[in-house]
Amino acid sequence: MAERITVDAVHKTYPGGSQALVDVSLTVEPGSLLVLLGPSGSGKTTLLRCLAGIERISRGMIRIGEQVVADGRFHLAPERRDLSMVFQDYALWPHLVALDNVAFALRRRGLGRTERRKDAAAMLERVGLGALTQRYPSELSGGEQQRVALARALVAETGLVLCDEPLSNLDADLRERLRVQISALVRGAGATTIYITHDQAEAFALADQVGVLERGRLVQLGPPEEIYTSPATAFVARFTGLAGELAVRVRARRGPNGTIEVEPIGGLRLSRPLHARSAIAGLGSDDALLTIRPTAVRICLPDAGEHHVLGTVTDVAFRDRGYEHAIDLPGQTMISGVFSEGRVGRGETVGLHFEPSGCLIFPRNGAPAA
């Protein structure tokens, strides 16, 4: 049965005073999939280990279903939390074949050996390894080993599945195929799932909710669409994909659809007014940071009158449906990841048009928009 997960004001401090988690609170609804996203050192693995019971929290509370499993004084052992884990390094028993690796997870269910192996074989069939049940981990590819690990996590039908960057050791094509399979299997099992990654594309593709961590703090929690379209801080915007950033000054008037007109600081000259979205109130003419999503940038002819700025193409890379360009702006930074179906040569001058919907203003100090 899927469980509701509650994390309330959790702190984790290591000996010496290093804070790994600071006042983290969140709720994961039964049967949903939460992805914890953040760079190395953000606290996402520590939080997962605290949920699993591998790490003790310093204070706060964690509840799985109706049961408090940790509150800073009380700590329920991992084996008593009725959860499953899928690890980055697979964590398979090397001396057991795939069938017995999966069946091992059923020992605590009190099933007989024959029934355990029957259920394990059925789960391996579901993950596409029905023909490889008698192979040892050393005889399986990385992707096959990860599917054995996934089968082991799901066969026990626990209320909570924790996934610790399970796809990070796999090549890109296999990673995409297994991502789809993991999503289908955990949702099919109805399990509550918490999945950690540093890959924003993977997070957005998998999650019902995304939680972004920075230096041990949960800085934003919401659906993938909300995280992308309305990031709470410049950090969240950067980590979820930017073409570039511009230092700007906010002008004291609003543009179309409630956007704010901005002007670059430095040597960059605009050919037309530039508007951006912002939740900042009363910023006046103060300096600000304009973050630009790749989807907000369009290449146009330099003499067509559509562009906001002119730039020089410094690099171009072929992608499956077209080309991505890196464009140098005079007196400012480079704008990268600008997609176009046609290829523009290195050294050519191009115009760039910015859509306000993907241009987001933050204070220069990176604080949340107020």
Image (cartoon, rainbow, N blue to C red):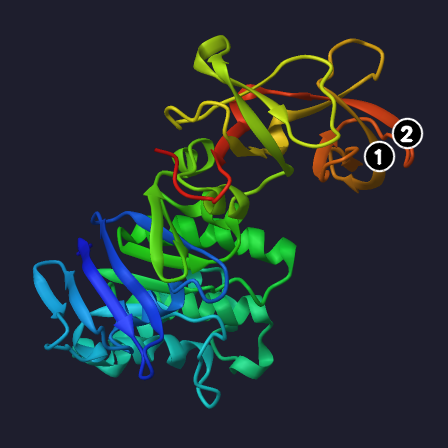
Horizontal and vertical percent position of residue 144: 54, 68
Q: Residue furthest bottom?
A: 95
Q: How many marks?
A: 2
> As rendered, which of 50 and 163 lies closer to the eye?
50
Image quadrant in which you'd find residue 355: top right
Q: Which mark sits nearer the N-terminus, 2 or 1?
A: 1
Foreground pick, 267 / 137: 267
Where residue 227 appears, as percent x and y from the top left, is 42, 38
| Label 2–label 1 contact, CB within 8 A | yes
Q: Secondary structure at mark 1?
A: strand
Residue under the point 27% across and 71% down? 12
Image x and y of residue 229, in percent: 45, 31
Residue at coordinates 24% horizontally, 63% vertically from top-left?
Answer: 157
Residue 182 visible, this orientation:
yes
Residue 357: image location, x then y, percent = 52, 22
The numbered dot on residue 120 is: none
In space, the residues marked 2 and 1 are separated at their CA atoms by 6 Å
Residue at position x 52%, y 33% in the image: 288
The quarter in which the N terminus is drawn is bottom left
Q: Is 140 left or right of 22, judged from the image as shown?
A: right
Whether residue 205 can be seen here: no
Left or right: where does residue 215 sit relative to residue 188? right
> Dot 2, how many residues are within 10 Å of its Cα: few (below 14), some (14-19), or many (20+)?
few
Q: Which mark is residue 313?
A: 1
Residue indicated by mark 2: 348
Q: Nearer the viewer, residue 124 or 72?
A: 72
| Quarter-of-image position of residue 45 | bottom left
Q: Amino acid at mark 2?
A: Glu
Q: Is residue 84 above or below residue 234?
A: below
